[in-house]
Amino acid sequence: MADISEKLQQQVMQAYENDTPLNIIGGNSKAWYGREPQGEPLYVSGHSGIVNDMPSELVITVRAGTKLSEIAGALDKHGQRLPFDPPYFGEDATIGGTVACNFSGPRRPYAGSCRDFMLGCTMLNGKGEKLRFGGEVMKNVAGFDVSRLMAGSMGTLGVLLDVSLKILPHRLAEQTVVIDAGFKQAIKLMNHWAGTPLPVTAMCADGNLVYFRICGTPSAVERSMRDIGGSIYEDGKAFWKDLREHQLDFFQSDAPLYRLSVPPAAAFEPLAGTTEHDWFVGWGGAQRWLKSDVDFAVVQSYAQKLGGHAKLLRGGDREAEVFPPLAPALMALHKQLKHSFDPKGLLNPGRMYKDL
Amino acid sequence: MPAQLLSSLAKLLPESALLTSEEALRPYECDGLSVYRGLPFAVALPETMEQAQSIIQLCKQLNTPVIARGAGTGLAGGAMPTKDAVVLSLAKFNQIIEVDVDNRTATVQPGVRNLAISEAVVEHGLYYAPDPSSQIACTIGGNVAENSGGVHCLKYGLTVHNVLGLKFLTMDGELIELGGKALDNAGYDVLALLHGSEGLLGVIVEVTVKLLPKPEMAQVCMAMFDDIEKAGQAVCDVIAAGIVPAGLEMMDSLAIQAAEAYAQVGYPTDVAAIVLCEVDGTAHGVNDYIEKVEAVLTGAGAVETRISQNEEQRLQFWAGRKAAFPAVGRLAPDYYCMDGTIPKARLAEVLKQIAAWSDAFGLPVANVFHAGDGNMHPLILYDANKAGELEKTEAFGKKILELCVQVGGTITGEHGVGVEKLDAMCVQFGKTELEQFFAIKDAFDDKRLLNPGKAVPTLHRCAELGRMHVHNGELPHPELDRF
């Protein structure tokens, strides 16, 4: 619980002066993500603490090094939560790292992503200038939306100092039901129910079962269960947490793990060289994991045919590109944007793309 | 140059798609904020992507500013032309390209009207959620450029939360595609950055929106208060009770009286404030929550509550609120609509200060308020024909926006900066942020030809105004002369 923003600012200014590349480290719970980290470590987890908790405004402002567990605990006291259900991937996970990765959990298709709940941030750009964008209110169109741009930028545009996020109340009741279904049928079922007003807040499929989580008032949950049918899955809470944290058996493998983002109703046809056992479908069909030694380029082209894109999430060759390739004009724009924030290219260089 | 520009444009477009006479240009002289006007050099109405690309490339070559325009319903002068600029109207890009029911998306051209999307998909039980009050006229391209909101954004988000994919043209005429029908896109979130960028970064040429299933049911609780502070607190209480209303709106007595006189929907005219709280979802959920809403509002001191008993009554409850702007428009020759956002807890204090200034300036104010998300629309009543009254109104408006920033809010919640709030931007941001904005602008448009002079004020302007945001305890523009 300390404000070390001045120290961090000095460190970034120093790095700018000396042309020292920096590797921004929060809780170090996601060091496995993205390309291989390079540069001098810049430790930001000391910059932590809740700055402003405003339950009736549905807004919380926290320093970037604050642990997710601390935020969850504070929000829970008012019956509230981070709506995007972030995975931790380690107990030291911080909000800054979560925003930098734009990680969201099983609730994401129905509630929104981490980026959707970004309201404002304070950050250091690559020159060590301290900048404040957005604010602590839900509607704000003053200036370019840099706060949302920061989400998912992997620390390549700036060092987050604090973030303001929209929060939401817990739902009153929750129940998980399962129906026997292979992937093809599961994708049909999930998209069918996603097209109705029922309060479904998570759906996934493992090839044998399709899982539905329903959250709302007790009577709304009961009625939705009747409509959807299937049987109650007793340990629902633990299941969704294990899915979020990649603790399910499916994720216990040494093979590279790919993550595909595709239109939710895209038909399921296993890629050549893979079997149904290599797949897990989340986000109601919109996020699909593949554990396989198949070449990244092959997976990418498969995802593109489905109307989406793929990234290498864990394992594999982290010296090569791991994120989806960008069209030349878009990559050129990325480089110019990177340059506008970090003219010397010192912040997390190459962590996202080789040339960023 | 003008002659060369004109002859080159004429080669790119059919005669009917290029407007140059003063008479033809006049309808384009302003957007919904008609106090700021200017005629452009020409208006181009391309019909094809190739035409739009060539116009942009030509303008870049000849250093001519390009001002993209949708329906012109903006409220901040964001589409106001300048005399050296070509207005690029997207009015002819008005086709719904695809409705994908399985994936719940619609891909549309930028000139498609907001409401037309929902109308096109109603048969599938779907709709497009953001509902700015101009939704029958405003276009989706403009909605993206302004990141438009509406009365339902507390629950359903702004435009940025409901767009999955975009295609846009850069100032080089290059077509860039972002996202699609998947839930996220690769690389930086340029898609989010373009939302609310007010035409300064690119020209939107195609939008893929997310469609939502229509709620089974919606119900409104209308609560009357004899004290505006109690009403403000009631709004906070609803949120603190764990309810996420689909809409949570508030009006003060002058707005209520105007709305009732105009729409005759049965609002009591002797109360200090009305709060409208709508919940939607499944019938079961709505029944549970509307009772809770009523209990909270009563507990907060409402003198009377009414719950809509059917769809007709629900629409009737809303009719007064939705008619508030034209209704207030009958009270005075002109009104000036503000758009600041504040933390809800500061509402009573801000309204009191506005009332005090209203007396001091001698200008009445009616308040309508997207209370759930803290977005205020004070409407300052004035008469533009009275010498000095517009200037007085603008001065009053600026004080309100400064107050919004002071209490932790922002100068614009949903209408944008345009030309109107450039000075207020100097209050909200310091030198380093403004420089970063220009650096972003340059990354997209190095010659600064896309809608120049809007949205982001130059450092000189801020310095000359003396409206300086004190940043980290330092004065923001030490390198500039002060006048």
Image (tube, helix red, strand yellow):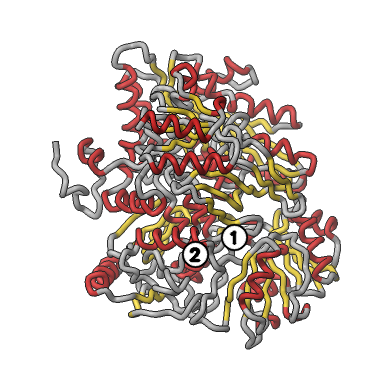
Q: Which residue appears at 23% of the width and 72% of the height?
A: A14
Q: Which residue is nearer to you in this view: A118 or A48?
A: A118
Which labelled disc corresponds to residue A116?
none
Q: Is residue B124 left or right of residue B372?
A: right
Kindly state the secondary structure of the residue where label 1 is placed: loop
Task: Look at the picture and state if B180 lies above or below B264.
Answer: below
Q: Which residue is mark 1?
A: B184
Q: What residue type is disc 2 on?
A: Gly
Label 1 to label 2: alpha-carbon separation: 10 Å
- Quadrant of the rendered image containing residue B154: top right
Q: What residue type is disc 1 on?
A: Asp
Q: Residue furthest bottom?
A: A254
Q: Quadrant of the N terminus of chain B?
A: top left
Q: Which residue is mark 2?
A: A152
**Do callouts 1 and 2 mark residues in contact (Cβ within 8 Å)?**
yes
Can residue B254 be seen in the rendering of this structure? no
> Label 1 lies in what chain?
B
Kindly state the secondary structure of the residue where label 2 is placed: loop
Q: Quadrant of the C terminus of chain B?
A: top left
> Label 2 lies in what chain?
A
